Amino acid sequence: MSGILVLAAILSAWGQTCCSGGVPVSSNLGFAAADQGTLQLSVATDVLLLRSLFAKDVRLADAGRQRTTTSLLFRAAYNPAARLTVETLLPYVRQSRTIERSVGADDVATTRGIGDGALLVIYDAVRAHPTIRLGTGVRIPLGDSDTRNDQGIFFVEDLQAGSGAWDGLLFASFEVAPSTRPSATTYLNAIYRVTGTNRESRGGTQAYRFGNELQLIAGYNDQYFTLGQLWNSGAGLRYRSVQRDAIDGFKNTGTGGRFLFVRLQHGIALGDHLLEANLELPLYRYVNETQLTPTVAFGLGWYTQINFSKPQRIFMQ
Amino acid sequence: MCQRLILNLILCLLAVMGCSDRSQLIPDAGEWSVPADEVFDGGPGKDGIPSIDHPQFTIAGEVDFMEDQDLVLGMRIGDQVRAYPHLILDWHEIVNDESGNMRLAITYCPLTGTGVAWDRNLPGGTTTFGVSGLLYNTNLMPYDRATNSTWSQQRLDCVHGELRGTLAATYSLIETEWRIWKAAYPESQVLNLNTGYMRSYGSYPYGDYRANHDRLLFPVMPVDNRLPLKERVLGVLAGSAQRVYRFNDGSPPVEIITDVLGGEDLVIVRSKINQLLIAFANPDRLTFTVADSLFPEILRDGQGNTYDLLGQVVEDVSGAAPLALPEQMIGYWFSWGAFYPGIDLYPD
């Protein structure tokens, strides 16, 4: 496999999270196709800042509230067969809610811990140009969903590291390299998350279900050698649509909405390793009722792969 | 070298994510007067729902941002008669107000529909109240900014912190529709939309919550199903006794009932068509009838004195004294059933 393809593998897969659901899983799944016997590894960090208060699609002049989600994402994927990939993700999440108060110090609530994991099986339906991949999986409730603050009070659901529920995941991706420029990649990833219900929310007093979520991530990457290094730059869009959460079966107000983001990425190959930085900014937001929405997100990641069946350097230099 | 760089990067990230946040408030020490397991974080956080600390008012006759059916809370504060619209309180829940030498906090809980005015003069000095972000029986828990103590609105006492066990000094509000209020008090002052915040005033923030009898946002214990959970009723507190009164069925248009609660004589005015449900203390056991011309008068005693919705004397023919408002709140039935299990229900 060429270094060009390897670089594309990571760049098309990194995404950002929103506070709804608490843990960034869905948008960070889906390594690119790899050869049989290949192990792909990645560690990435995402920082998401929510400071923009919106009522439907109108920004409200109020910067008194802030949510920050910092995630460390460990990902691994292995190809046991030519067209089959088994991918896992394990996040470590730190979330904070800060209120700038008119009197006294800021009110800060912070949680941290292992978040919900994910297991995804992907089949390469078409493996040429274009590449079409289909997958399914589960989000596994590994994270705590019943942590309390120092006063013994349960943190609100979207501050918990875990959701307390098993979710179903559906994945599809379409990727093509233009014949006129094989170093470039155009991709579209779709991830649908069918959420389960945490029947033990708040000590078993409520049944809480996060809203189902659809994400579409489309982008264009191009790779080039300069200054003796292989570089990759990309840009794309991410659309996220989330249904309302539900409490005891009733729709929860102040949850759910539609978002469109622009994403910018820049990466470099260092020996057998890849490093990438990314930035995501909102273009459009429509929320149900009034909600705090993403203001900016950025991240940094590392990626490598090892092919156990055909040992080789992964980059041509 | 590259691997070492990456390893160091990962270790730094883990260190940053694991460190404690220095700006985090030191948690309050001490116990809760209510079961801590039944106190819930509502989501926005302390002061995440901002109180109005510099309220501004418009004369009722000049208000143009309310519809006739909108509900308001009203009271006499100092020498002023003031109204606080639900459509503003839904988004702020607390108004720190003052007039003359009175320093009050008007608190309103949209999830239980209850409101009351608190004296802001607490042991240790005058303070303001803020929204703690916590709920007990899905009811607002204000906190005082002097001691950071947490209070229970419907229990009317401090349940956590330095002032735990302190009873609140409160004043009762009346609740009615805007059409009634502006007819009764056209010169009164009405909290206006210049709150200092940009919110969707007029848009109820909780969907169908107030009309859906099956839907509660946070656990309530116990749930009393004798009435529909969201039926608006008047709860009256007299000493250690509590009783709930319902709106009448519309006939007669204004109904007066007398009752004794906790040894105190009461007269209750209820009118479904006028959306009035008010209890007055009646220590002299006067006999009342409905005033001839409604609003602001509502009651006439046997000597011909008339009284308005706030119990003030309007027509004084025999040196009448104002009628006091006992502790009372209009609110959703479920909250009275939860705070006062087995609460007495006035027989209709």
Image (cartoon, rainbow, N blue to C red):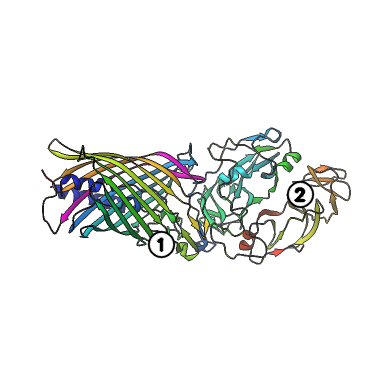
Label 2 close to label 1 by CB (< 8 Å): no
Q: Position of residue A23 (x, y in %)?
A: 36, 54
Snapshot quadrant of residue B180: top right
As drawn, which residue projects farthest toward the right? B303
Image coords of residue A110 (percent x, y): 39, 52
Q: Which residue is mark 2?
A: B273
Q: Residue at x 22, y 58 (%)?
A: A78
Which secondary structure type mostly characterizes the magenta part of the structure?
A: strand
Under tag 2, what secondary structure?
loop
Question: Are dots 2 and 1 on a single chain?
Answer: no
Foreground residue among B280 and A25: A25
* Residue under the image location 48 percent in, 41 percent down: A54
Q: Nearer the viewer, residue B331 or A184?
A: A184
Q: What residue is drawn where x is 73% and y is 49%? A: B275
Q: Which residue is mark 1?
A: A165
Q: Which of the 4 image quarters holds residue B27?
A: bottom left
- Toward the viewer: B61 or B68? B68
At mark 1, the secondary structure is loop
Residue range highlighted in magenta:
A283-310
Quarter of the image holding residue A166? Answer: bottom left
